[in-house]
Amino acid sequence: MAKHSSDSESITSSGDRIMMVSLLEEATHLKETDTLAAEKAAEKGLLLSLQLQDRNYQFEFSYLLGRILTLQGRLDEAHAILNEALKLAKTHFPKDRPKLSLATNSIGIVYYSQDNRELALDCFLKALQFDVLDQKLKILNNLGNTYTVNGNHEKALEYFDAAREEADRVGDVYMLTALLLNSTTSLAHFGDMERALSYSKEALGIANTKINWDERFIHLKIHALMTLGDLYLEINEYENALEVINESLEISEKSSSYVSYCMALNLMAVTYLKMDREEKALEYVSRTLENCEKYQHERAKKDVLDNVIEYYEDKGEIEKAYPYLKLRYEQSEIEIKKSRDENFKKIIGEREMEIQLLEEKNDEIISQNLLLEQFAHIISHDLKEPIRNIVSFSHLLERRLIGQLNDEVSEFLKFIVDGARNMNQNLTRLLDFTTLKKLENQEVQKISIPELINSLNEDYINIIHPFIVQIDYPNEDIHMVLEHAVALFDEIIRNSIKFRKKGENCNIKITASQEAGHTKISIRDFGIGIKSEYQKQIFKIFNRLNKKDYEGAGVGLAICERIVHLYKGQIWMESKEGKGTIVHFTISHE
């Protein structure tokens, strides 16, 4: 009997394994066309893998289920199960770079879908560091998308171009098509609408050709249609926009692509708002909010609320905007709590990981920088939303009580709005300060000082009209990351303009000299100068010496000092009250 029982268990186990393999294939196949059926297959397979204690298949099903839930828009559930997949990989497959990369990248996609861009970027960059060739294309694409929504379109196109080269090299038509679509937002930003439309139509053509042989192209077709709709909106071709967006809406609903469905509903609402067809627009606003709530799609919910609020504010119908302002306020409170919880959990998790890294590599600087960036996200995200609400509701109160307020109350409201705007400016500058990146050698380039100053000069032409800004500069080069050089010179020059002598032109003289191992730059102005006792304090963050007469957050020179330190340099100043100031800094040649 014992022998018979053992044979039975062996046969059962073998049958379960065959079924487990079959369920993985089924869930993978259905993921692009029927996410509900795919979810059932993945859940059943996950249970089998747990019963059989097969860690490898447990990871595969957890990862796959997380991706399916992401496609459905069930982002909280997706995040939880993908975190379990990552823990599983770290515990049982610590040297399996493809698994670690796959799980990290997928968690980044969830953060991206939740509009948590800083943590998404962090995940994508970490996934890229695992250097898994099979996943490199998707990660480069995700980085491009994140930089796009962050508004860094130049950086986005760099990643998209790099990804397209790789896709072309390996002959990946699917990714080539996706990259054509993802490039369009940045192309449109730079005004190249012709190429953006061409890319979208080319991608749609490829998707239509391939869709019968490769079901993954269903999602690319949806993406192509919505991208075309966006572009048609940009050039005011509303009927064309409605046609393609409506088609994407139908396909999204049919294929259970709920994230795309919410985004398409929002696009329909935006189109009707632009056409000033208020009743029809509000119908789609209502449908978007209902489905965003159902499928946990916070970004589409935020977008549709912002769009309808802006529509009514532009028309001066603030009373109609009120219910949407209230919803936006409630959403921001939920977002803040969720963001705070997620970020602090992330910090704790990162701390544990970085302790291990410190033991292995003694890399304390990387550890601290990661924590600082995550802390900066908490500050910027959790505080900026309440500030926006203060400004919006103050304006609403002012408009509602127009004609009923005495001068004193009007002045109080102005103080509230001005204070909120100043706080918003301080947070933006604080974020600039805390998110400055370490140097990457491939980004350092030779920058012509004349070309740099000439490009900056365009912003200074009318800044103190009718007076002028005159800048003398040397014909020298400096080796830096371009965005660092722009920020460094611009901050110092703008300070010279701000603290010029009243009623006079602003004259600035820049000199450069090559010294042992570094370049020394001196930027001299002939303005009001700074008392000697304040000159060491000036580089401290939020240190403003004349708050009453001059605007600013007191972060600019702290940013300059941080940039210079990235290049192993020093920054200091000489100044005499009433005579002007010279800011010196050095940039290492290393």
Image: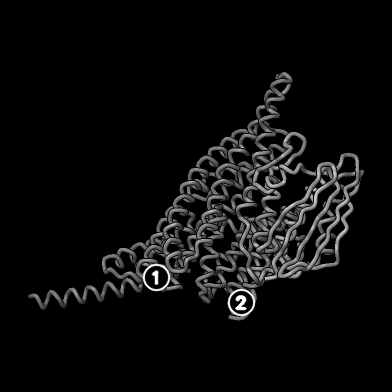
Pointer 2: what residue? 166
Instruction: Please provide percent x and percent y for residue 356.
Output: 42, 64
In this rendering, position of residue 486 left or right of residue 295 = right
Q: Which of 78 and 206 is in front in this view?
A: 78
Q: Is residue 345 left or right of 169 when viewed as pictured?
A: left
Mark 1, Cα crowd under 10 Å, few <14 / some 14-19 / many 20+, is: few
Q: Is residue 203 visible?
A: no
Of residues 201 and 297, the one drawn nearer to the viewer in this rendering:
297
> Circle 1 — which element?
loop
Residue sitting at the far left: 1
Task: Report helix, strand or loop for mark 2.
Answer: helix
Using the image as rendered, state which of residue 95 and residue 50 is in the foreground: 95
Residue 136 visible in the shown view = yes
Say what amino acid the circle numbered 1 marks. Answer: Pro
Which scheme is used to colour this image of the protein?
one colour
Q: Quadrant of the N terminus?
A: bottom left
**Which quadrant would residue 138 be assigned to in this image?**
bottom right
Residue name at image x 89 percent, y 53 percent: 470
Q: Earlier in the sequence, mark 2 or mark 1?
A: 1
Foreground of the two, 515 or 101: 515
| Crowding at mark 2 (Cα within 10 Å: few <14, some 14-19, many 20+) | some
Q: Is residue 238 above or below residue 321?
A: below
Residue 365: percent from left, percent from top: 53, 61
What is the x, y in percent for residue 519? 75, 66
Q: Residue 202 is drawn in which quadrant?
A: bottom right
Mark 2–mark 1 Cα distance, whole angstroms, equals 27 Å
Looking at numbered disc 2 in the image, what kind of residue is underneath it? Glu
Answer whether labels 2 and 1 touch (C-beta < 8 Å): no
**Residue bearing mark 1:** 94
Give the vertical position of 568 relative to 339 (above or below).
below
Q: Report the mark closest to the observer, 2 or 1.
A: 1
